[in-house]
Amino acid sequence: MKTAQSRANFKSAQSVIPGGVNSPVRAFRSVGGDPLFIKQAKGAMLEDIDSNKFVDYVLSWGPMILGHAHAEVLRAVLSAIKRGTSYGAPCVGEVELAKIIVKTVPSIEQVRLVNSGTEAVMSAIRLARAYTKRDSILKFDGCYHGHADHLLVKAGSGVATLGIPDSPGVPESFARHTLTAPYNDIKTTEKLIHKHARELGAIIVEPVAGNMGVVPPTVEFLQWLRMITDKYGILLIFDEVITGFRVHVGGAQTLYKVLPDLTCLGKIIGGGLPIGAYGGRKDIMQMIAPAGPVYQAGTLSGNPVAVAAGLETIRQLKKPGVYKELEKKSKELADGLGEAAKYAKIPFYQTRVGSMLGGFFTEGPVIDYAGAKKSNTARYAKFFHGMLNHGIYLAPSQFEAMLLSTAHTNRQIRQTIVAAQEVFPTLR
Ligand SMILES: *Cc1c(COP(=O)(O)O)cnc(C)c1O
């Protein structure tokens, strides 16, 4: 594979951008090698600046559920752009997008648009703290909720250990307000809640974890979270930035029939343009300025181009049969990968919720971050590069999801399975 152009650009990027990228995972650090610079993308295909072509299973980390450069979405974006790219004043598209979100996501009665998933989560936490008048939050180890200070925290070694910062620059005094528990672990979470109930304003969870690889929840875990948060007056926040409009048009909350108080959205609702949103119960949302005292604002929030892309994307997703078709293709791909691994005698523990696929190089089971970390990441790196050489673009990290779009064809899925049949035996 020729990579001279990408290599040269990466070198030059590193002189003006820290690490050469504007978001860390893109740099290929955990799989080795240099990242590819993308020239263009269409449907399920990416083309880099050396003219290599790949079937894309990253999909810009989630937004491109219809594939790249979808004709109807492009049409909506072009039409919006011609009317100006930002007004800093209300526009009709914002209300239309809010209405379709309220109608589709069952727990959302009111919604505020922001510019990224990080911003959505950060704002939802501020709101939850204001509403409950409590400062602490609880998150789950291995769940990613964007890079706001109080969420860049992971579990310490002990069960009741208070949060320690994941990054320099996050004050310990912030991290102290963030408790962490293992995903799917009711017992540990219950102990923490009992101990800290009076300080806990919110529990935030990815209802399907997608940032430690894919780790599905148990239904009991989500149901129990709803029960225990109700019991102690804690707000339950679902971070559906990745699962929203992906695992079901109504999100994971519809799939698992558990309704949170607040929901964070992003990725798909912007159709590939920068966006985020948080919404939920009206009595809580009414606390946001200017309706209420909780301040949150944004120069580009409700951007007319982003809302046009998001609206059209959701309209396309609401067509009959879309999720059934995605499920069918995703299952076929997962089955094919599983058989290829089995035939090559490579331990490969698979997880999947709809079009979110996970595969860990371990016997499993993987139900939390500790389990995910048992994966042989060196083997993943080899798998990643082997697949890349066969024209398949996977996430450059074990701890990310493999995602499908409506644009992936049966032929591309078969091509992917054939590639895996050739790559798995090289991993022994
Ligand atoms: C991607 C993601 C975020 C952060 O969204 P950004 O738009 O990258 O800020 C937050 N939560 C989850 C679950 C995500 O997958």
Image (cartoon, rainbow, N blue to C red):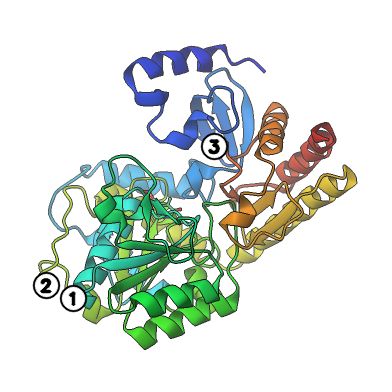
Q: Is mark 1 within 8 Å of ligand 1?
A: no
Q: Which residue is mark 3?
A: 42
Give the residue at x 59% y 36%: 45
* CB within 8 Å, label 3 to label 2: no
Q: Contact, CB < 8 Å: mark 2 with mark 1?
A: yes
Q: CA distance from mark 2 to mark 1?
A: 6 Å
Mark 3 touches mark 1? (CB < 8 Å): no
The local crowd at label 3, few if under 14, some if 14 to 19, many if 20 or more residues have their Cα within 10 Å, is some
Q: Position of residue 64 (x, y in %)?
A: 49, 47
- In front of the other: 415 or 195: 195
Instruction: Give the Cα distance between marks 3 and 2.
Output: 44 Å
Q: Position of residue 147 (x, y in %)?
A: 35, 48
Task: Please tell me in which quadrant of the rendered image residue 95 appears.
Answer: bottom left
Question: From what the image shows, is residue 33 above or below residue 194?
Answer: above
Left/right placement of residue 418 relative to residue 100 reads: right
Q: Nearer the viewer, residue 144 or 418?
A: 144
Q: Is residue 226 above or below residue 271?
A: below
* The quadrant where residue 86 appears: top left
Q: Which residue has dot 2 on it?
A: 292
Q: Helix, strand or loop at disc 2?
A: loop
| Badge 1: residue crowd in 10 Å (few <14, some 14–19, many ≥20) | some
Tell me residue 80's x, y (percent): 29, 47
Kind of residue indicated by mark 1: Gln
Identify residue type, mark 3.
Lys
- The numbered disc on residue 12 is none
Q: Secondary structure at mark 3?
A: strand
Cα distance between the residues tagged 3 and 1: 41 Å
Q: Which residue is mark 1?
A: 286
Q: Determine the residue positioned at 29% across, 67% down.
A: 136
Residue in the picture at 54% in, 22% down: 34
Q: Earlier in the sequence, mark 3 or mark 1?
A: 3
Q: Quadrant of residue 185?
A: bottom right
